[in-house]
Each structure stands twice: as C-alpha cells, then as structure tokens.
Image (spheres, helix red, strand yellow):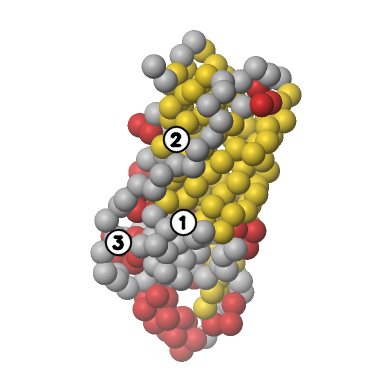
Amino acid sequence: MRIEHDSRSTGRVTGWLHPPLLAAVALCLLEACQPRAPAPERTRTAIAAAPSAGRAFRVDAAASRFEFRLRADGPLASVGHTHVISSHDLAGTIWLQAPPGQSSCALEMPAASLLVDDPGERRTAGGEFAEPLDADARAGTRDHMLGERQLDAAHHPAVSLQCRAIRVAGDSATVELAVTLRGRESVLQVPAKWRQQGDTLEIEGEFDFRQSALGLEPYSLMFGALRVADLIHARFALRARAAS
C-alpha cells in the first residue's frame, strides 16, 4: 500500500537543504496530504469458501491485530514521515487439521477500518515511529490510502487473505499466503508461531514484504527524491475461538 507523506521531519537532516527547495518540497507535501472527501462507508465482502474439513476457529477481531510499518526513502527522506497502519477488524475462519500442515484459512481485512498513524499505535511502536502526527495529516494520508490510485476501497472494500499451503516445524510454520488486493492475487511466504489451548488458537509473527510484490507502486515526489520505501514491515497477532 502506498502511503502519502507530509512535510514534517521525523529524523535529523543529514545534509544542508537550500531554503527555496525546502519550501517547494513542503508545498508539494502539504498539497499531497490535504483531506479529501470522506472515505466510503465500509462494506464487508464475502470471504471465499474454504474446505470444511478440520476444526473451525473464528477469528476474534477484538483480540487480533495486524500492523504495517512504513518508512520514507530517497535523498530527501529526512523531510518525510514514518507511518503506522493497523487493523483491529479482521474477520474469517481458520480450519485446523491433523496433521496441522493441511490446515487452511480464509480471512478478510476491511480497508475502511484501517487506522492510520493512531497516536496510541505510534507510541506503542516507539523509536522512529513514536512522534505524533496532527489530525489533518492523518486524515489526508488515510484519504489517499483509500483512494482509487492506491487501495481503491470504493471498488475493493476488503483485502482477502487465504492460506494455500502450510509447512509446519514444531510450534512454528511457514504459510503460503495468497493476498488479493484490488482484484489482483499475490503470494507471500509468511512465518508464524501458533499455539492451541482448548478452544482457543493463537497465531503470531512478523515479516517484510514489498509493495511492488502486491502490484502497488510506492508513492513518490520530485522524480523519486522523496518516496515511501518499497519494503514494509508487518506484524500480526491473531486469536481465534472454536466455532460452536
């Protein structure tokens, strides 16, 4: 996903920047982060059918989260921002089988419910992500993220996640995860740890992926002098409960 930047710096300037050039950059960035029309009302898409074999666990949205951390890149990266995008509204089912390598999942992440640079999320992330961003910057970034040139939430209201293959080693696994974004399917290799206790299933992990691997072009300004880094770091923690 391509996330816009505004003009406030999150790091130290490592070189001297001519004032007129800095003013031009600031103007461009402020224009890029101006709020647009409200994001479309959230609608849920149907989660693709998955095999019914195995024990079904429904994802507990209130106890689950997905987080994406983005950084600025390019020669003018010091005048850009880091971003923390998070989801606490995952829905879907995990089918746990024996052996667990034959398990599967079908999940969705509603685009309109994504949190953009929430102050609490940024504080939790810490380090270079901890600096708060003002409300106008957050709203502008969110509008652009949901817009037709990026997630296009009006036509594709959710990101679909499906487990295609799982390689298990003890309590760890590598999941071949099919991601459908803007109607285009891509496959990521996602490491995860899992634990089952009675009727509760917990899965967590973190991994890096490239926007370009999902068919997205990172946002950039001034012929790439300031851009969002292609590489994104993702973290997730899922809790699911056995279906009755």
Which residue lies at the image location 42% right of the left edge and 20% below the top edge? 243
For disc 3, the marked residue is 39
Secondary element under disc 3, as helix, strand or loop, is: loop
- Give residue 7's position: percent from left, percent from top: 42, 72
* Residue count near mark 3 (Cα–Cα under 10 Å), binned few <14, some 14–19, many ≥20: some
Secondary element under disc 2, as helix, strand or loop, is: strand
For disc 1, the marked residue is 83
* Mark 2 or mark 3, earlier in chain: 3
Q: For marks 2 and 1, give the CA distance.
A: 26 Å
* Mark 3 or mark 1, earlier in chain: 3
**Tag 1: amino acid:** His
- Quarter of the picture holding the C terminus: top left
* Mark 2 or mark 1, earlier in chain: 1
Task: Note whether 3 is above or below 54 in the view shown.
Answer: below
- Eye-nearest disc, 3 or 1: 3
Secondary element under disc 1, as helix, strand or loop, is: strand
**Tag 3: amino acid:** Ala
- Give residue 53's position: percent from left, percent from top: 57, 23
